[in-house]
Image: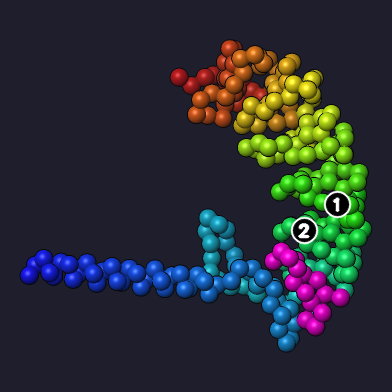
Amino acid sequence: MTYLNDALNRIIAFGALLSLALGLLVGCASIAGERYEVRKDGVYWISYPGSSAHPSFEKLERKTAANQVTFEALAFASWGKDDHRGYFEGIAVTGTDPASFTAISNILATDDTGVWYGTEPIDGADGATFRLIGPQLAVDKAAAYSGGSRFVPCDVATFQPVDSEDGDFSADSKCVYFAVFKLPLQDRESFDLIGAGYSKDRFAVYWRQDQVIGADVATFRLAPGTRLGRDKSGCWLGTEMKACLK
């Protein structure tokens, strides 16, 4: 009898947990992400405060200046436009041409002449030729872009992202870059990534965009299980020599 009671209790407990899990799933499914809502009295931007680490189910809504008759939500949820201008997260983006205004990522949009990083125009960017070549990298006919920052590479025609764990390296046929900064390479042909922001050519070691003065190219490597550099002379944290941990 005790065995039957225990089994029944386990079944009841499992059923309660299953119901709770289904309830949570239904509840989560009923909550849409950030978006625009077009209503009779206007266009509203719907958002949820918090972060991925601390999400919130509190719904906030803000009425925008958009015309609800002509408003159009664009490919990425943060962007929209009406017959007068573009919008980013419900905020009007000035200077945009609505006929050619297009979202190309969650944070970037273009029209026939300009490019916007959120609500801010990117000075000098050419909207007609601007294109993404990586999550944070883009090019147009004359320059390259890291996020919303413009820089002119040595050879824009061959400019490409470099596959790395850091995600901030790029290169062309003549130079290598970390974010918008050119590495002071002495030999482009022998460039190689080490990891943890380190790279090298046959003459020197670099951390991000700076040379690691005093590092030994032949023996430089990452210390096992760390993001520290190490060579025959000691250990390195960024460009600074540090005592090695025993």
Say whether marks 1 and 2 touch (CB < 8 Å): yes
Label 1 element class: loop
Residue 71 is a magenta residue: yes
Label 2 element class: loop
Q: Earlier in the sequence, mark 1 or mark 2?
A: 2
Q: Which residue is mark 1?
A: 130
Question: Residue 172 at what x, y percent from top left?
Answer: 81, 34
User: 189 or 238, which is in the foreground?
Assistant: 189
Question: Image point 79% across, 77% down: which residue?
Answer: 71
Q: Amino acid at mark 2?
A: Ile
Q: Amino acid at mark 1?
A: Phe
Task: Examine the rendering and report whether any part of residue 68 can be seen.
Answer: yes
Query: What is the residue that sits farthest to the left in this orientation?
Result: 1
Query: What is the residue that sits farthest to the bottom in this orientation?
Result: 40
Question: Residue 216 at what x, y percent from top left?
Answer: 65, 14
Question: Image point 70% across, 22% down: which residue?
Answer: 200
Quarter assignment of residue 62: bottom right
Q: Which residue is mark 2?
A: 104
Q: Which image quarter is the C terminus in?
A: top left
Image disc number at residue 181: none
> What separation in Å lies between label 1 and label 2 (alpha carbons)?
10 Å
From the viewer's perspective, is residue 24 above or below residue 117? below
Question: Residue 192 at what x, y percent from top left?
Answer: 70, 25
Q: Residues within 10 Å of mark 2 (few under 14, many from 20)?
A: some
Magenta highlight range: 68-83
Q: Magenta residues: mostly which secondary structure? A: loop
Q: Is residue 132 left or right of residue 165?
A: right
User: 138 or 235, which is in the foreground?
Assistant: 138
Q: Is residue 94 left or right of residue 135?
A: right
